Amino acid sequence: MKYYACSSIENLELAFLGHIDIGNCVTFCCEDVKEKPMIGLREPKETVEEILRLYQDIKLKSIQLAEEGVSDSVLTGCIKCPMFQLKQKEIQSISEVKKRMIYDYIKMINISVYPAPCQAKCIYCNVRKFKRLMQYNENFEEFYNRMFEIIRLLQEEYHLIKPSTNWFIASGEITIHPLKRKLYDLTMDKNVVYCSNSFKYDEQLGDILATNRNAKLSFSIDSGTPETWSLVKGANNWETMRENLNRYHKKALTCQQIRLKYIMLTGINDNPQEYAAVINLLQDLGLRSLEIARNQYETDIQRSVKDTATFIQCLKKANIEYQLRGYSPEEVKQINEIL
Ligand code: SF4
Ligand code: SF4
Protein backbone atom coordinates (compact mmCIF):
# COMPACT_ATOMS: atom_id res chain seq x y z
CA MET A 1 0.00 0.00 0.00
CA LYS A 2 1.27 3.45 -0.91
CA TYR A 3 1.01 6.44 1.38
CA TYR A 4 2.57 9.84 2.00
CA ALA A 5 4.36 10.66 5.24
CA CYS A 6 7.27 12.44 6.85
CA SER A 7 9.35 11.07 9.72
CA SER A 8 7.45 13.26 12.22
CA ILE A 9 4.13 11.68 11.23
CA GLU A 10 5.55 8.17 11.07
CA ASN A 11 7.07 8.57 14.52
CA LEU A 12 3.96 10.23 15.94
CA GLU A 13 6.06 13.13 17.15
CA LEU A 14 4.31 15.61 19.35
CA ALA A 15 5.35 19.24 19.61
CA PHE A 16 4.04 22.02 21.86
CA LEU A 17 5.17 25.13 20.02
CA GLY A 18 4.76 28.90 20.25
CA HIS A 19 2.12 30.83 22.23
CA ILE A 20 0.69 28.45 24.80
CA ASP A 21 -2.34 30.61 25.54
CA ILE A 22 -3.54 31.71 22.11
CA GLY A 23 -4.03 30.03 18.76
CA ASN A 24 -2.80 26.56 17.94
CA CYS A 25 0.25 25.19 19.68
CA VAL A 26 -0.05 21.41 19.47
CA THR A 27 1.39 19.84 16.34
CA PHE A 28 3.50 17.02 14.91
CA CYS A 29 6.64 18.81 13.77
CA CYS A 30 8.64 22.01 14.12
CA GLU A 31 8.95 22.68 10.40
CA ASP A 32 8.15 26.23 9.39
CA VAL A 33 5.24 25.25 7.13
CA LYS A 34 2.10 27.35 6.84
CA GLU A 35 -1.13 25.45 7.53
CA LYS A 36 0.66 22.42 8.90
CA PRO A 37 -1.58 20.24 11.09
CA MET A 38 -2.06 22.04 14.41
CA ILE A 39 -4.64 22.24 17.12
CA GLY A 40 -5.26 24.46 20.13
CA LEU A 41 -4.69 23.62 23.78
CA ARG A 42 -8.19 22.85 25.06
CA GLU A 43 -9.26 20.74 27.99
CA PRO A 44 -6.68 17.95 28.38
CA LYS A 45 -8.89 14.95 27.61
CA GLU A 46 -10.48 16.72 24.65
CA THR A 47 -7.04 17.74 23.35
CA VAL A 48 -5.65 14.21 23.60
CA GLU A 49 -8.66 12.85 21.67
CA GLU A 50 -8.18 15.52 19.06
CA ILE A 51 -4.44 14.80 18.68
CA LEU A 52 -5.17 11.12 18.07
CA ARG A 53 -8.07 11.86 15.71
CA LEU A 54 -5.92 14.27 13.70
CA TYR A 55 -3.05 11.80 13.59
CA GLN A 56 -5.34 9.02 12.38
CA ASP A 57 -6.98 11.33 9.85
CA ILE A 58 -3.62 12.38 8.39
CA LYS A 59 -2.50 8.78 8.02
CA LEU A 60 -5.72 7.62 6.35
CA LYS A 61 -6.00 10.68 4.08
CA SER A 62 -2.37 10.30 3.03
CA ILE A 63 -3.16 6.76 1.83
CA GLN A 64 -6.12 8.09 -0.18
CA LEU A 65 -3.86 10.73 -1.68
CA ALA A 66 -1.25 8.18 -2.73
CA GLU A 67 -3.66 5.47 -3.89
CA GLU A 68 -6.47 7.51 -5.47
CA GLY A 69 -4.99 11.00 -5.91
CA VAL A 70 -7.71 12.46 -3.67
CA SER A 71 -6.52 15.28 -1.44
CA ASP A 72 -8.12 16.47 1.80
CA SER A 73 -7.92 19.78 3.67
CA VAL A 74 -6.20 18.10 6.62
CA LEU A 75 -3.14 17.72 4.36
CA THR A 76 -3.07 21.33 3.08
CA GLY A 77 0.18 22.20 4.87
CA CYS A 78 1.89 18.82 4.51
CA ILE A 79 1.39 18.76 0.74
CA LYS A 80 3.51 21.93 0.50
CA CYS A 81 6.22 20.43 2.70
CA PRO A 82 9.33 18.84 1.12
CA MET A 83 9.40 16.26 3.95
CA PHE A 84 6.05 14.78 2.83
CA GLN A 85 7.27 11.88 0.69
CA LEU A 86 5.59 9.03 -1.14
CA LYS A 87 6.28 5.71 0.57
CA GLN A 88 5.27 2.12 0.27
CA LYS A 89 4.77 -0.59 2.87
CA GLU A 90 3.47 -4.11 2.99
CA ILE A 91 0.12 -3.14 4.46
CA GLN A 92 -2.94 -4.90 3.02
CA SER A 93 -5.91 -2.85 4.18
CA ILE A 94 -7.17 0.30 5.88
CA SER A 95 -8.29 -1.77 8.85
CA GLU A 96 -4.73 -3.02 9.28
CA VAL A 97 -3.49 0.59 9.22
CA LYS A 98 -6.01 1.49 11.95
CA LYS A 99 -5.00 -1.55 13.99
CA ARG A 100 -1.32 -0.68 13.76
CA MET A 101 -2.02 2.84 14.99
CA ILE A 102 -3.21 1.44 18.29
CA TYR A 103 0.29 0.09 18.89
CA ASP A 104 2.15 3.18 17.78
CA TYR A 105 3.76 5.27 20.44
CA ILE A 106 5.17 8.77 20.57
CA LYS A 107 8.87 8.75 19.69
CA MET A 108 9.55 12.42 20.43
CA ILE A 109 8.01 15.13 22.60
CA ASN A 110 9.17 18.68 21.97
CA ILE A 111 8.28 21.34 24.54
CA SER A 112 9.01 24.75 23.02
CA VAL A 113 6.15 26.87 24.30
CA TYR A 114 6.06 30.52 25.29
CA PRO A 115 5.81 32.86 27.19
CA ALA A 116 9.09 31.76 28.71
CA PRO A 117 11.95 33.97 29.90
CA CYS A 118 15.46 34.19 28.47
CA GLN A 119 18.24 36.60 29.43
CA ALA A 120 20.23 36.28 26.18
CA LYS A 121 19.77 38.47 23.13
CA CYS A 122 20.86 36.22 20.28
CA ILE A 123 20.89 38.15 17.04
CA TYR A 124 19.12 35.35 15.19
CA CYS A 125 16.41 34.81 17.81
CA ASN A 126 12.90 35.18 16.51
CA VAL A 127 11.30 34.92 19.92
CA ARG A 128 12.94 37.96 21.49
CA LYS A 129 11.55 40.17 18.69
CA PHE A 130 8.16 39.68 20.31
CA LYS A 131 8.61 40.88 23.89
CA ARG A 132 5.40 39.25 25.05
CA LEU A 133 6.84 35.81 24.26
CA MET A 134 9.46 36.27 26.96
CA GLN A 135 7.19 37.83 29.57
CA TYR A 136 6.02 34.94 31.67
CA ASN A 137 3.63 35.57 34.57
CA GLU A 138 1.61 33.26 36.82
CA ASN A 139 -1.48 33.58 34.59
CA PHE A 140 0.24 31.28 32.12
CA GLU A 141 0.74 28.48 34.63
CA GLU A 142 -2.79 27.23 33.98
CA PHE A 143 -1.89 26.65 30.31
CA TYR A 144 1.40 24.95 31.13
CA ASN A 145 -0.50 22.73 33.60
CA ARG A 146 -2.90 21.79 30.83
CA MET A 147 0.08 20.71 28.73
CA PHE A 148 1.50 18.69 31.64
CA GLU A 149 -1.88 17.01 32.12
CA ILE A 150 -2.09 16.13 28.41
CA ILE A 151 1.32 14.50 28.68
CA ARG A 152 0.27 12.63 31.84
CA LEU A 153 -2.85 11.31 30.11
CA LEU A 154 -0.85 10.19 27.07
CA GLN A 155 1.57 8.40 29.36
CA GLU A 156 -0.61 6.89 32.07
CA GLU A 157 -3.98 6.36 30.40
CA TYR A 158 -3.17 5.97 26.73
CA HIS A 159 0.28 4.34 27.21
CA LEU A 160 1.62 6.22 24.21
CA ILE A 161 4.77 7.50 25.91
CA LYS A 162 7.45 4.85 26.50
CA PRO A 163 10.82 4.94 28.27
CA SER A 164 12.45 5.18 24.82
CA THR A 165 10.50 8.33 23.89
CA ASN A 166 12.89 11.25 23.30
CA TRP A 167 12.26 14.63 24.91
CA PHE A 168 13.41 18.06 23.80
CA ILE A 169 13.00 21.01 26.18
CA ALA A 170 13.45 24.46 24.68
CA SER A 171 10.97 26.89 26.21
CA GLY A 172 13.09 30.03 26.62
CA GLU A 173 15.99 29.41 29.02
CA ILE A 174 15.42 26.36 31.20
CA THR A 175 17.65 27.51 34.08
CA ILE A 176 15.48 30.57 34.77
CA HIS A 177 12.12 29.14 33.75
CA PRO A 178 9.64 29.62 36.63
CA LEU A 179 8.35 26.08 36.02
CA LYS A 180 11.76 24.48 35.61
CA ARG A 181 11.17 22.11 38.53
CA LYS A 182 8.08 20.70 36.84
CA LEU A 183 9.96 20.41 33.55
CA TYR A 184 12.86 18.65 35.29
CA ASP A 185 10.54 16.36 37.29
CA LEU A 186 8.82 15.34 34.08
CA THR A 187 11.99 14.54 32.17
CA MET A 188 15.03 14.06 34.45
CA ASP A 189 15.14 10.26 34.03
CA LYS A 190 14.29 10.27 30.30
CA ASN A 191 16.16 10.48 26.99
CA VAL A 192 16.13 14.24 27.12
CA VAL A 193 17.87 17.24 25.58
CA TYR A 194 17.76 20.51 27.52
CA CYS A 195 18.56 23.66 25.55
CA SER A 196 20.42 26.20 27.62
CA ASN A 197 22.41 29.35 26.85
CA SER A 198 24.88 28.59 29.71
CA PHE A 199 24.59 32.14 31.10
CA LYS A 200 23.82 30.57 34.47
CA TYR A 201 24.92 27.34 36.11
CA ASP A 202 21.95 25.40 37.41
CA GLU A 203 22.69 22.88 40.19
CA GLN A 204 19.70 20.71 39.36
CA LEU A 205 20.61 20.52 35.68
CA GLY A 206 24.18 19.60 36.69
CA ASP A 207 22.82 16.86 38.98
CA ILE A 208 20.65 15.47 36.19
CA LEU A 209 23.69 15.25 33.89
CA ALA A 210 25.57 13.53 36.71
CA THR A 211 22.93 10.84 37.23
CA ASN A 212 21.33 10.23 33.83
CA ARG A 213 23.66 9.50 30.91
CA ASN A 214 20.70 9.90 28.54
CA ALA A 215 20.24 13.53 29.57
CA LYS A 216 22.01 16.06 27.36
CA LEU A 217 22.72 19.75 27.39
CA SER A 218 22.43 21.43 24.00
CA PHE A 219 24.18 24.75 23.76
CA SER A 220 24.47 27.06 20.78
CA ILE A 221 27.93 28.58 21.17
CA ASP A 222 28.11 30.21 17.71
CA SER A 223 31.57 31.66 18.41
CA GLY A 224 35.07 30.86 19.58
CA THR A 225 36.12 34.27 20.90
CA PRO A 226 34.69 36.65 23.54
CA GLU A 227 34.19 39.42 20.96
CA THR A 228 32.07 37.33 18.63
CA TRP A 229 30.22 35.79 21.57
CA SER A 230 29.22 39.29 22.76
CA LEU A 231 28.14 40.28 19.28
CA VAL A 232 26.00 37.19 18.78
CA LYS A 233 24.57 36.86 22.31
CA GLY A 234 24.25 40.53 23.21
CA ALA A 235 26.09 39.97 26.51
CA ASN A 236 29.61 40.40 27.81
CA ASN A 237 29.85 37.17 29.75
CA TRP A 238 32.19 34.86 27.84
CA GLU A 239 34.17 33.92 30.97
CA THR A 240 31.01 33.06 32.93
CA MET A 241 29.76 30.92 30.06
CA ARG A 242 33.12 29.09 29.86
CA GLU A 243 33.09 28.46 33.60
CA ASN A 244 29.50 27.15 33.49
CA LEU A 245 30.26 24.95 30.52
CA ASN A 246 33.28 23.49 32.37
CA ARG A 247 31.12 22.77 35.40
CA TYR A 248 28.43 20.99 33.35
CA HIS A 249 31.12 19.09 31.50
CA LYS A 250 32.71 17.93 34.78
CA LYS A 251 29.33 16.82 36.10
CA ALA A 252 28.30 14.89 32.97
CA LEU A 253 28.93 11.15 32.93
CA THR A 254 30.00 11.18 29.26
CA CYS A 255 31.26 13.79 26.80
CA GLN A 256 28.31 13.00 24.51
CA GLN A 257 26.02 14.64 27.05
CA ILE A 258 27.34 18.08 26.10
CA ARG A 259 26.14 18.98 22.59
CA LEU A 260 27.58 22.15 21.12
CA LYS A 261 26.02 23.87 18.14
CA TYR A 262 27.40 26.52 15.81
CA ILE A 263 24.88 28.55 13.80
CA MET A 264 26.60 29.89 10.68
CA LEU A 265 26.21 33.67 10.63
CA THR A 266 27.49 35.28 7.46
CA GLY A 267 30.01 38.05 8.12
CA ILE A 268 29.98 37.40 11.87
CA ASN A 269 31.38 34.01 12.81
CA ASP A 270 32.41 32.64 9.40
CA ASN A 271 36.15 33.25 9.51
CA PRO A 272 39.18 30.96 10.05
CA GLN A 273 40.15 32.58 13.40
CA GLU A 274 36.74 31.84 14.82
CA TYR A 275 36.77 28.27 13.51
CA ALA A 276 40.24 27.67 15.02
CA ALA A 277 39.15 29.14 18.37
CA VAL A 278 36.01 27.06 18.68
CA ILE A 279 37.95 23.92 17.68
CA ASN A 280 40.43 24.69 20.49
CA LEU A 281 37.57 25.06 22.90
CA LEU A 282 36.09 21.71 21.84
CA GLN A 283 39.49 20.04 22.22
CA ASP A 284 40.00 21.58 25.67
CA LEU A 285 36.74 19.99 26.76
CA GLY A 286 37.51 16.70 25.04
CA LEU A 287 34.43 17.04 22.82
CA ARG A 288 34.65 15.18 19.52
CA SER A 289 31.59 16.52 17.73
CA LEU A 290 29.86 19.76 16.72
CA GLU A 291 26.47 20.50 15.17
CA ILE A 292 26.63 23.04 12.37
CA ALA A 293 23.29 24.76 11.87
CA ARG A 294 22.06 26.85 8.99
CA ASN A 295 20.78 30.29 9.93
CA GLN A 296 17.13 30.02 8.90
CA TYR A 297 17.10 33.72 7.91
CA GLU A 298 20.24 33.49 5.77
CA THR A 299 19.93 35.40 2.50
CA ASP A 300 23.35 34.71 0.93
CA ILE A 301 22.91 30.96 0.57
CA GLN A 302 25.87 30.44 -1.79
CA ARG A 303 28.27 32.11 0.61
CA SER A 304 26.87 30.21 3.56
CA VAL A 305 27.25 26.90 1.70
CA LYS A 306 30.92 27.70 0.93
CA ASP A 307 31.59 28.85 4.51
CA THR A 308 30.01 25.71 5.90
CA ALA A 309 32.24 23.56 3.68
CA THR A 310 35.34 25.49 4.80
CA PHE A 311 34.39 25.03 8.44
CA ILE A 312 33.82 21.31 7.90
CA GLN A 313 37.29 21.01 6.36
CA CYS A 314 38.78 22.60 9.50
CA LEU A 315 36.79 20.23 11.73
CA LYS A 316 37.90 17.21 9.70
CA LYS A 317 41.55 18.23 10.03
CA ALA A 318 41.07 18.40 13.79
CA ASN A 319 39.35 14.99 13.77
CA ILE A 320 36.07 16.40 15.01
CA GLU A 321 32.79 14.95 13.75
CA TYR A 322 30.00 17.20 12.54
CA GLN A 323 26.26 17.01 11.97
CA LEU A 324 24.45 19.42 9.68
CA ARG A 325 21.15 20.88 10.91
CA GLY A 326 18.56 22.80 8.91
CA TYR A 327 20.25 22.53 5.49
CA SER A 328 18.07 21.45 2.57
CA PRO A 329 19.03 18.26 0.67
CA GLU A 330 20.21 20.48 -2.20
CA GLU A 331 22.43 22.55 0.13
CA VAL A 332 23.90 19.39 1.65
CA LYS A 333 24.66 18.16 -1.87
CA GLN A 334 26.43 21.44 -2.72
CA ILE A 335 28.44 21.29 0.51
CA ASN A 336 29.52 17.71 -0.25
CA GLU A 337 30.55 18.68 -3.76
CA ILE A 338 32.94 21.29 -2.32
CA LEU A 339 34.40 18.88 0.26
S1 SF4 B 1 4.36 19.96 7.72
FE1 SF4 B 1 5.93 18.59 6.87
S2 SF4 B 1 7.18 17.91 8.59
FE2 SF4 B 1 5.28 18.81 9.41
S3 SF4 B 1 3.86 17.10 9.70
FE3 SF4 B 1 3.47 17.92 7.65
S4 SF4 B 1 4.81 16.76 6.26
FE4 SF4 B 1 5.52 16.42 8.35
S1 SF4 C 1 19.06 31.58 24.05
FE1 SF4 C 1 17.37 30.89 22.71
S2 SF4 C 1 15.51 31.96 23.45
FE2 SF4 C 1 17.31 33.00 24.34
S3 SF4 C 1 17.72 34.70 22.95
FE3 SF4 C 1 19.02 32.99 22.31
S4 SF4 C 1 17.81 31.87 20.75
FE4 SF4 C 1 16.40 33.25 21.86
Image (cartoon, rainbow, N blue to C red):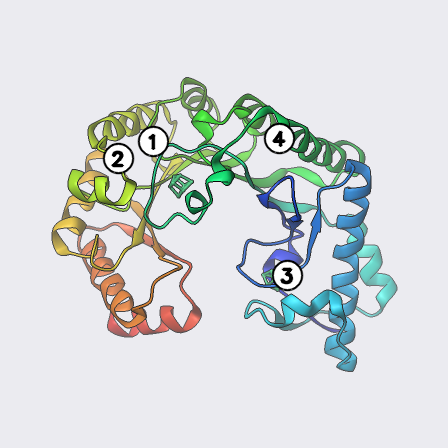
Mark drawn on residue 198 = 1
Q: Earlier in the sequence, mark 1 or mark 2?
A: 1
Question: Residue 170: in sight, yes or no?
Answer: no
The quarter of the picture where residue 38 lies is: bottom right
Residue 56 relative to residue 118: left or right: right
Q: Earlier in the sequence, mark 1 or mark 3?
A: 3
For marks 3 and 4, give the CA distance: 25 Å
> Pointer 3 and pointer 4: residues touching (CB < 8 Å)?
no
Residue identifier under label 2: 235
Q: Earlier in the sequence, mark 4 or mark 2?
A: 4
For marks 1 and 4, give the CA distance: 25 Å
Mark drawn on residue 36 = 3
Judge: label 3 CB < 8 Å from ligand 1.
yes
Residue 131 relative to residue 247: left or right: right
Q: Residue furthest bottom?
A: 69
Check disc 3: other Cα within 10 Å, few if <14, some if 14-19, many if 20+: many
> Pointer 1 and pointer 3: residues touching (CB < 8 Å)?
no
Q: Position of residue 83 (x, y in %)?
A: 56, 67
> Pointer 4 and pointer 2: residues touching (CB < 8 Å)?
no
Q: Residue furthest front?
A: 131
Check disc 4: other Cα within 10 Å, few if <14, some if 14-19, many if 20+: some
Q: Nearer the viewer, mark 1 or mark 2?
A: 2
Residue found 22% across the figure and 51% down from its top: 319
SS category of the residue bearing label 3: loop
Q: Look at label 2 and name its amino acid.
A: Ala
